[in-house]
Image: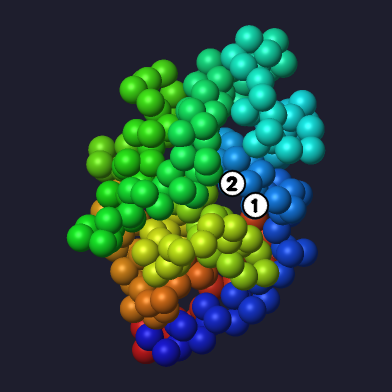
């Protein structure tokens, strides 16, 4: 475990710098200095974080550009009629303009009711049930507001999905280092779950962190527990740096077998 931790720490220290963020939808969160805008942008950007990264960046840009300097103010001050006009040609793979409007509607209602998305999420954190999965379920139901038309953007974690994009959003909002901005206060990064997609699943499987055959929620929890044994206070610390290994193929150097099997 010491050897793999040393390898992980080495790549963390290499990639824990803003210059490595591009290409990643996280770069849109860093574009805004106001924490209240960062959370709105973060939810939009993470919700579209599937498919080719160039397409993700283009799709997120097409949403944010009409919003001006404050996406939060834009969402609160506008309505579905304007959204339908501005985004009538929007499409991101399986996500349509109706899905986007449903997401914006949920964000607007949550902001109007709770003031911030962070407050909305925090109210679902339960000392008697500290699992972030429990809180995430309540957060998603608030955003859905009884609607089901955009389930693909806001999946319910109790259905067994790894909910990669939602956990990615939480990583951005709760962790704070040179890459993750962490605008939310009062929630420990120790409760976070690894944002698991097929790419991260392949890396973690190769590293021997899981033996499960599918990248579902149980697999995400198993991998998170592995990381928690290495860094209990911040189990998703290495998520960003490991994801860079796949994007920057020239840097993809796996640890020696002696590290994986000491």
Q: Quadrant for residue 77, please give it.
A: top right
Give residue 235's position: percent from left, percent from top. 42, 70
Instruction: Depth check: give the residue in front, 54 or 182.
Output: 182
User: How far, Cα to Cα, is label 2 from label 1?
Assistant: 6 Å
Q: Quadrant for residue 155, please give it.
A: top left
Q: Is residue 245 visible?
A: no
Could you tell me which secondary element the residue under label 1 belongs to? helix
Give residue 241's position: percent from left, percent from top. 59, 67
Residue plotted at (41% across, 76% down): 233
Could you tell me which secondary element the residue under label 2 belongs to? helix
Residue plotted at (43% across, 32% down): 143
* Up/down of 190 relative to 103, above or below: below
Quick one: label 1, few (<14), some, or many (20+) residues within 10 Å?
some
Disc 2 target residue: 39
Q: Is residue 188 left or right of residue 222?
A: right
Instruction: Depth check: give the residue in front, 19 or 256.
Output: 19
Give residue 231's position: percent from left, percent from top. 42, 78
Q: Is residue 6 visible?
A: yes
* Up/down of 171 relative to 102, above or below: below
Residue plotted at (52% across, 35% down): 111
The dot on residue 11 is none
Residue plotted at (26% across, 38% down): 159
Image quarter of the C terminus: bottom left
Q: Is residue 199 left or right of residue 208?
A: right
Disc 1 target residue: 35
Image quarter of the N terminus: bottom left
* Up/down of 159 relative to 17, above or below: above
Q: Is residue 156 left or right of residue 26?
A: left
Give residue 201's position: percent from left, percent from top. 42, 56
Q: Are dots 2 and 1 in contact, CB under 8 Å? A: yes
């Amino acid at each position: 475990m010491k050897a793999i931790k040393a390898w992980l720490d080495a790549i963390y220290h290499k990639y824990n710098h803003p210059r490595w963020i591009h290409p990643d939808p996280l770069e849109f969160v860093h574009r805004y200095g106001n924490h209240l805008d960062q959370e709105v942008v973060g939810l939009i950007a993470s919700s579209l974080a599937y498919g080719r990264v160039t397409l993700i960046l283009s799709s997120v840009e097409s949403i944010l550009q009409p919003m001006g300097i404050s996406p939060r103010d834009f969402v609160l001050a506008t309505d579905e009629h304007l959204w339908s006009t501005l985004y009538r040609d929007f499409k991101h793979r399986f996500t349509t303009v109706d899905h986007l409007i449903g997401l914006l509607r949920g964000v607007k209602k949550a902001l109007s009711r709770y003031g911030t998305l962070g407050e909305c999420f925090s109210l679902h954190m339960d000392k008697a049930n500290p699992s972030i999965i429990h809180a995430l379920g309540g957060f998603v139901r608030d955003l859905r507001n009884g609607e089901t038309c955009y389930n693909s953007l806001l999946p319910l974690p109790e259905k067994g999905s790894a909910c990669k994009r939602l956990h990615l959003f939480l990583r951005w909002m709760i962790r704070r280092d040179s890459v993750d901005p962490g605008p939310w206060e009062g929630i420990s990064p120790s409760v976070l779950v690894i944002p698991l997609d097929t790419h991260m699943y392949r890396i973690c499987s190769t590293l021997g962190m899981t033996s499960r055959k599918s990248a579902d929620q149980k697999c995400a929890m198993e991998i998170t527990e592995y990381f928690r044994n290495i860094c209990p206070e911040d189990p998703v610390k290495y998520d960003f740096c490991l994801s860079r290994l796949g994007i920057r193929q020239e840097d993809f150097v796996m640890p020696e077998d002696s590290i994986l099997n000491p």
